[in-house]
Amino acid sequence: MRLVRTSTEDFSDEELAVTKEQLGQIYVDVSSKLAPDDFARDLRKLRPSAECAACSRRAACPGCWEGVPVDVFGRDDGRVREILASLTGRVLDVGGGEASYLASLDPGVEYVCVDPDEVRLAVLASRGRPGARFVVGRAEALPEGLGTFDHVLFLRSYNHLVEPARALAGALALLRPGGSLLLVDNVAFGLVRAAPHAARAEAAPENQLEHYRNDGAAEADAAVHAASRSLRLVERRDVGHPTSNQWLLRYQ
């Protein structure tokens, strides 16, 4: 065993307790990167040792954690890709500048991506996907002339929104009757690193894509229902001990 300790001013003690104890979102960084960008490869999930659950002193102890022999990120992402592969018609991807899931869409889908990062969109456009359109704009003020859509996606962009209520309202106004809305995002997680690795990472330039909030499925679901009462929730996947830090909401 080894003792791992860190301090942070980004979250309260109560928020840290939820992340660690309630949601079980603790990972060990097996990469040497300043910031992990391929979670399935770079991170290994940890879980409390079975011995800890029966210990009378557990509440006053940080606990002993061990590796989970499952790729939780790949497994949970697999469901997202299944849903995307089933979509047809016109698809609006709000805040999809990295387009991590673009390859999962059927080639016949008419794909429209809106993102404020002009450079990222130019790179995506250069890849020449037939029928794809990349539009520079903010989620909170979608450009005019986009048309209407059969499906609206917020894929790992919801917690990056400055005004999620405004962005949802604008996007849902473009959703055709009978269409679907898919939201997928992540909550905060604890990262175990050796001291030298942690020091290098903390001294690195700030990541410009940091989350504005730490909303989970419950908070996002409330925001969706506030934006539209005509949507019906058909699938919800919350974050918990058996899962990765990724949640999913799907509506029709």
Image: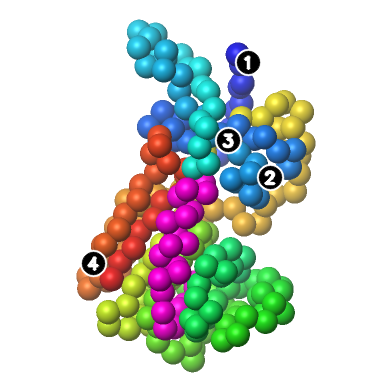
In the image, what residue occupies the spot 26% across and 62% down? 233
Can you say which quadrant of the picture contains the N terminus? top right
- What is the distance, in whole Å, between disc 2 and disc 1 at their CAs? 22 Å
Q: Inspect this view and state whether residue 114 appears.
A: yes
Determine which of the numbered discs, if any, sits on residue 232 in the image: 4
Q: Inspect this view and state whether residue 133 appears.
A: no
Q: Position of residue 84 (x, y in %)?
A: 45, 68
Give above or below for 197 relative to 184: above
Q: Earlier in the sequence, mark 2 or mark 4?
A: 2
- What is the distance, in whole Å, between disc 2 and disc 3 at their CAs? 14 Å
- Type of colouring: rainbow
In the image, what residue occupies the spot 35% across and 51% down? 237
- Element class at badge 2: loop
Crowd tier of the residue under label 2, counting other residues whose Cα lies within 10 Å: few below 14, some 14–19, many 20 or above: some
> What's under tag 1, amino acid-wise?
Arg
- What is the distance, in whole Å, between disc 4 and disc 1 at their CAs? 48 Å
Residue 113 vs residue 34: left or right?
A: left
> What's under tag 2, amino acid-wise?
Ala
Judged by depth in the image, the label closer to the viewer, 3 or 4, is 3
Give above or below for 32 relative to 126: above
In the image, what residue occupies the spot 42% across and 56% down? 79
> What's under tag 4, amino acid-wise?
Arg
Name the residue that disc number 2 marks: 35
* Observer-nearest of 78 and 210: 78
Q: Position of residue 243 (x, y in %)?
A: 43, 41
Name the residue that disc number 3 marks: 44
- Element class at badge 1: loop
Name the residue that disc number 1 marks: 2
